[in-house]
Amino acid sequence: MASLQDQLLKAGLADEKAAKAIQKEKRKQRKQQPKGAAPVNEAEVRARQARAEKAERDRQLNQQRHQEAERKAVQAQIRQLIESNRVARSGDSPYQFVHDKKIKKLFVDETMVDQLSRGRLAVVSLGDQYEVVPEGVARKIMERDPAVIVALHERKQDDAATDDPYADYQIPDDLMW
């Protein structure tokens, strides 16, 4: 069976000059390639590059999905912390605080106003509502997302001693439990 080049020459579709020029060009290309190197297939190179680009896009998409899932998990943890630890508020004393450059007001009793101002309680936002939670819970929420904490005052060092009702009593050295 004759090569395609021979068949084209017999049919008169190509002349010998063009055939020799093509053979010469092919020989040059083969000589320029290093020995033992496989001929470069452009389609294969493009396919490999397309696979690499697709893998990169997939990796980025998976990373975005993972970050979104983490964000939703953190929001669920915050919601659970607030709902399980919120302090029931009742009373008619207003406690005012600033949220989003607006002054907001919660009605609580006098002891809660005192505890809020001393930093023992904190105001957090849950959706479009405000809840009051203990300071420890507020610190845990702050670790996850500080934007949820609306009002949390810093405690003073001398504040801890004022609430201890047994601070004035000395503990005897010989006390056995």
Image (tube, helix red, strand yellow):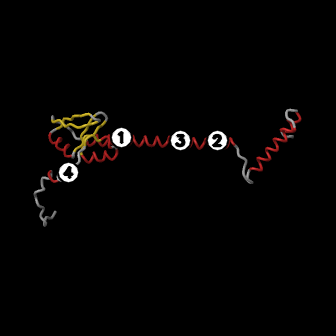
In this view, 57 is above or below 37: above
Q: Earlier in the sequence, mark 2 or mark 4?
A: 2
Q: Earlier in the sequence, mark 3 or mark 2?
A: 2
> Mark 1 or mark 4, which is nearer to you?
4
Tell me the element at label 2: helix
User: Would residue 44 be found to the left or right of residue 71 on screen?
Assistant: right
Mark 1 surroundings: few (<14), some (14-19) or many (≥20) residues within 10 A? some
Residue 78: percent from left, percent from top: 33, 42
Q: Earlier in the sequence, mark 1 or mark 4?
A: 1
Residue position for label 4:
156
Task: Give amino acid for label 3.
Answer: Asp
Tags 3 and 2 in contact by the CB under 8 Å rule?
no
The residue shown at (28%, 47%) is 139
Mark 4 surroundings: few (<14), some (14-19) or many (≥20) residues within 10 A? few
Residue 117: percent from left, percent from top: 19, 43
Tags 1 and 4 in contact by the CB under 8 Å rule?
no
Task: Give amino acid for label 4.
Answer: Lys
Quadrant showing the C terminus? bottom left
Residue position for label 3:
58
Tags 2 and 4 in contact by the CB under 8 Å rule?
no
Mark 2 surroundings: few (<14), some (14-19) or many (≥20) residues within 10 A? few
Q: Earlier in the sequence, mark 1 or mark 3?
A: 3
User: Would residue 138 be found to the left or right of residue 19 on screen?
Assistant: left
Residue position for label 2:
47
Residue position for label 1:
75
Alpha carbon of mark 1 to alpha carbon of mark 3: how far? 26 Å
Alpha carbon of mark 4 to alpha carbon of mark 3: how far? 51 Å
The residue shown at (62%, 43%) is 49
Q: Earlier in the sequence, mark 1 or mark 2?
A: 2
Alpha carbon of mark 3 to alpha carbon of mark 2: how far? 16 Å
In this view, 59 is above or below 37: above
